[in-house]
Image (cartoon, rainbow, N blue to C red):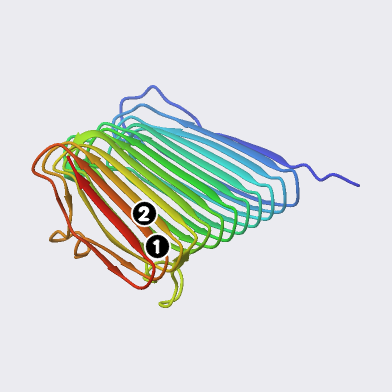
Amino acid sequence: MKKLTTLLFVLVFASSMAFAQNNDATTNQTGDDNQVTIDQNNYSSGAGHQATVTQDGDENVADILSQGGVGSNLVTVEQVGDENGATVDQYWGGNEANISQEGNLNSAFVSHRGSWKSSASITQDGNGNTADILDDGTPSDALEGNEASVSQYGDNNDANINQYASFNGASQWVAGNTNTVTQTQHSSDNSQRVEIEGDNNMYTVTQEGGTLNSLYVNSRGTGPGANSSDATNSTFTATQNGSGNLVSGSMGGDNNSLTITQNGSNNMIDGGSGFWQAQGFTIDGDNNVASISQNSSGNSATLSIMGNGNSATISQN
């Protein structure tokens, strides 16, 4: 088979001059087994880079490095086909990365390091895809926090968001079957959200060693699926370590398992103003199992279950 290989390497000039520089790179590739590499480096104050990559075909690869002092860098990658890979590394400043993939067995990775007011978004439509976002930034208040989001439509997909420091937000929207969703946050004042529907999905969230973290889970149809969607034969596991943390949400469907563990004082499973207005945690369906453990003092939990053959346990120590 004739192999079409097109390698476009974009070298964006770097300057030692003190004033800001804005660099732009655009790549369009059609065919299979293509590769594009973009390096944008400029440490001048206020520097801002922009890179756009479009690939149509199978087994294509896009690697983008974007770093520029305290400037704002923007990267957009679109891939259509199977077994494509996209990697975006952004350092310092306020960055934005958007990856969109349509097809099967694709992979996407975004890394933000030393950044603040940055956002990363991955959207995948297909089966057997993987998405990973790493936020290792330095936000100092709520206005400088980083945001990470993953949307997956299809089956057998895997998504992971890992955030360090405080004032970060993570969200995932999943529609399909046998998907795995993982979110981990370290430190305080972080928030997480998941909207999920389908069968045999697994969702795990951990908020480590901080205070005033919040988590919202919804599998009752306001996510990416229709209003009548729910979750069946799915597992939801949430762990919060620290004090003053909040869990809220709802789950609809049958044969689901919910496990929430809060280690620390003054934690709540309850509603909150501005936190999507959910009142505690609600389960609607049959043969569901809910287990809530709160360890230490000053904790509170509100759990409502509707349906048949359900089991609920609340343990406060």
Residue at (11% x, 43% y) in the render: 266
- The residue at the far left in this view is 298
* Residue 246 visible to an observer of this rendering: yes
62 relative position to 138: left or right: right
Is mark 1 in CB contact (under 8 Å) with mark 2? yes
175 relative position to 276: left or right: right
- The residue at the far top in this view is 16
Q: Secondary structure at mark 2?
A: strand
Residue at (71% x, 43% y) in the render: 34
Sequence-earlier tag: 1 or 2:
2
Residue at (78% x, 42% y) in the render: 5
Which residue bears the numbered disc 2? Answer: 258
Determine which of the numbered discs, if any, sits on residue 220 in the image: none
Q: Residues within 10 Å of mark 2 (few under 14, many from 20)?
A: some
303 relative position to 283: left or right: left
**Residue type marked 2:** Leu
**Residue type marked 1:** Asn
Quarter of the C terminus within the rendering: top left
* Residue 21 visible to an observer of this rendering: no
Residue 238 image point, x, y percent: 33, 46
Relative to the observer, which residue lies in front, 65 or 108? 108
Q: Secondary structure at mark 1?
A: loop
Residue 224 image point, x, y percent: 44, 67
Which residue bears the numbered disc 1? Answer: 288
Q: Residues within 10 Å of mark 1 (few under 14, many from 20)?
A: many
Q: Nearer the viewer, mark 1 or mark 2?
A: 1
Say if 298 sits above or below 172 in the image. above
Residue 168 image point, x, y percent: 27, 42
